[in-house]
Every structure is written in structure tokens, then in C-alpha cells.
Amino acid sequence: MTVLATSDELGPPARRSDSAARTMRVGPMFGLEALLGRFGVPLAPLIGEAGLPPDCFGHPDNRWPVDRLLDLVARCGEAANCPHLGLLLAQPVGPAALGAPLARLLGGALTVERALRGLTMNLHLNGEALVPALSVGPDGACFSITPYAWHRRGTLHLEDFSLAAAINILRFLGGPQWTPLRVTFAHRELADRRPYDDFFKAPLVFDAPQSAVYFDPCWLPRRPVSTPPGPAGPPSPPAAGEDLDIAVRARRAVIGAMAQGIVGVDAVSSATGLSRRTLNRRLAERGTSIRDLIAEVRLQVAQQLLRDTDLTVADIAVTTCYSDVAAFSRAFSVRAGQSPAAWRSARA
């Protein structure tokens, strides 16, 4: 872990990023109605309760607010009495459900690493629900997934869905011989973990600092089994990347760096390809700064882990890259108005 920002750098409390403005494609969720049918639950009333139009699933490229779609999945899970609904929803999801550009990228990459990095870059530029990161360390290759913003409902379903989809993609790239070393979940273990064991077929770790799939890095330089012989064609350009709001780019850079244990102004400016001065100037035009974004992301991750896991405050301090528990507790209290322990207790 590299700690490059201290609690003194956090600055004054900043407003939470507006997650309600973020949208996502409904294509990966197209199996929701059929899945609910297995439980005898109609989808239409729940769509209305979540504030979505009746035809929200009319086309796979339809985009709707992330918060409302997560609220819908949470309502579906409650109606079906199925806390692992996100896991079930993702089980048939493969590259095709991600859209044609990503399916072409995954189907034509020269190596597994290029496929995953291309997927990561496309989701960084065009996705608005998650921030993926690929890293290699002593524990193996790690494909981690972090929610882009705080969500009151549905985070567990979002992370389960994303991990299951990631496993499907890695199995698509590696073939039947690929297996994960372990899968970690940034939420508590459910009362019945059998659906997780049956699907992931790997050691599972709940109450983890991040949701991630770990696998042997020897797979990264290999040619995907899905790629036809011969040279690969030119990769599909990640559309809309240049037009992505600088604050969104910077926030994603903070989340991606934190997933690798690095938090700092220089790391964020490097990831965005801008000098520290230029990045701060452009962020100031949007009413924020690098240090404000770092503080927002630290708060988001800390609150999610306090709510969804039984990790100790000390573990969460390490995960959010603070030098010690005292620094974490001070910074959290300033921004949340409560100590970490009090905040967790109020939401137990």
C-alpha cells in the first residue's frame, strides 16, 4: 500500500457526487423478467415502484439512472425473497450483453491482458456504475470492481452481478481450463452461500476490503481462446472518452488508484494525463479539486464498508489508505458528522 495523501489534505467537506445523474445500459439486465418468473413475481409493478417507465427494457441500449435500476433490482430481490438475485441475474451474461463494441474487443484481443485492459478502459470512459481495475501483485492478478458512487440500495446486487459477469468474461477468454484463485466480496456472507459456491467454484472471502477476482497472472500474456488465429484487427475506439467530464475522469482515477492501495494528487494527475496544475485548474472550473475528489471517494468507500461488511475500523482505515486509525476517524467525522463507529451503529 502507498499512502500519498494525509488527513490534513482532505480540505473542507464537499458535496457528495450526484449518482442520480449517472446512467447505465439495461442490456445486461434483460433476463430480469424471466428470472423473476421463476419465483412467481411479476416485474411490471416493481418497475413502476422504482420510478422507471413501463418500456424501460424496450431496447438493450436504453439507459436509465443507476440509482433507479439498483432500486429496481433491490425491490426484485425483496419480492422474490432472494438476496443473491444479482448473482443469478448475471449467470447468463457474457460479452454480447455488454454491447457490440465491447464484444468485438473481447473477441479479438491478442492477449487476455489486452482484452481486460481494453474492457477496463471502455468502462472507465463509458460506464457510469462501476470502476474496474486490473493489477498484478504477490496475491496474483486482480480484477477489482468498485461502485462509482454511493448508492442507498442495491450495492450488494451490483457487486455480485459484476463479479459474476467478470467470471463469465474470464471464462470466455481463458476457456474451460481457466479457474480463479479466489473471489472476494465487499459485503457480509449471506445466510445461504451455496449459490455462490456453485457458481464461482473457487475459495470465497466475504467481508473483504474490495470485490475482486484473483487469478494466476500466467493467463495474462496468453491468447484468448475466443480470438481467431492470425493478427487481430484494430481495436474499437472507446467512443466518447475525449468528451468525458474531467471530474468524472478524475474520480475514476482516484477509485482505480485506491483499489491498488495508492492515494495521492500526483497519481490522479498522472492517470488523467494532465499536469497537477492543469487538472486542478480544470476541476476548479467545475467547483471541485483533486483533494476534494480524493476525500469524497475515501468517504464513499468507508461508508460502504461500514454498512455492508464487518471489517474493523482499523481495516477500513488501511483500505482507504490512511496512515493510522486516528487520522481516518478524524477525517471521517469531519465529513460525515459522526465517528465511524457511531455511523455504523446508526445503520445497523
Image: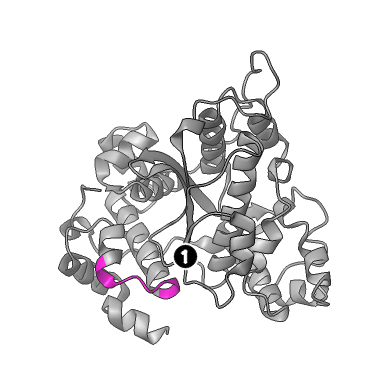
Q: Position of residue 26 (x, y in %)?
A: 72, 55
Which one is in front, 223 or 56? 223
48 relative position to 279: left or right: right
Residue positioned 16% across, 69% down in the render:
326
Quadrant of the rendered structure where residue 278 is? Answer: top left
In the rendered view, tell whether residue 156 sits above or below residue 297.
below
Which one is in front, 343 or 274? 343
In the rendered view, tell whether residue 108 sits above or below residue 57.
above
Q: Position of residue 125 (x, y in %)?
A: 53, 40
187 relative position to 77: left or right: left
According to the image, label 1 marks what residue?
A: 150
Quadrant of the rendered structure where residue 159 is? Answer: bottom right
Say if residue 54 shows up in the picture. Answer: yes
The tally of labels here is: 1
Region of the chain picked out in magenta, as a range:
307-314
Q: Position of residue 76 (x, y in %)?
A: 71, 74
Say which amino acid is labelled 1. Answer: Trp
Residue positioned 45% across, 72% down in the render:
308
Which one is in front, 140 or 273? 140
Q: Position of residue 108 (x, y in %)?
A: 66, 25
Which one is in front, 210 or 244? 210
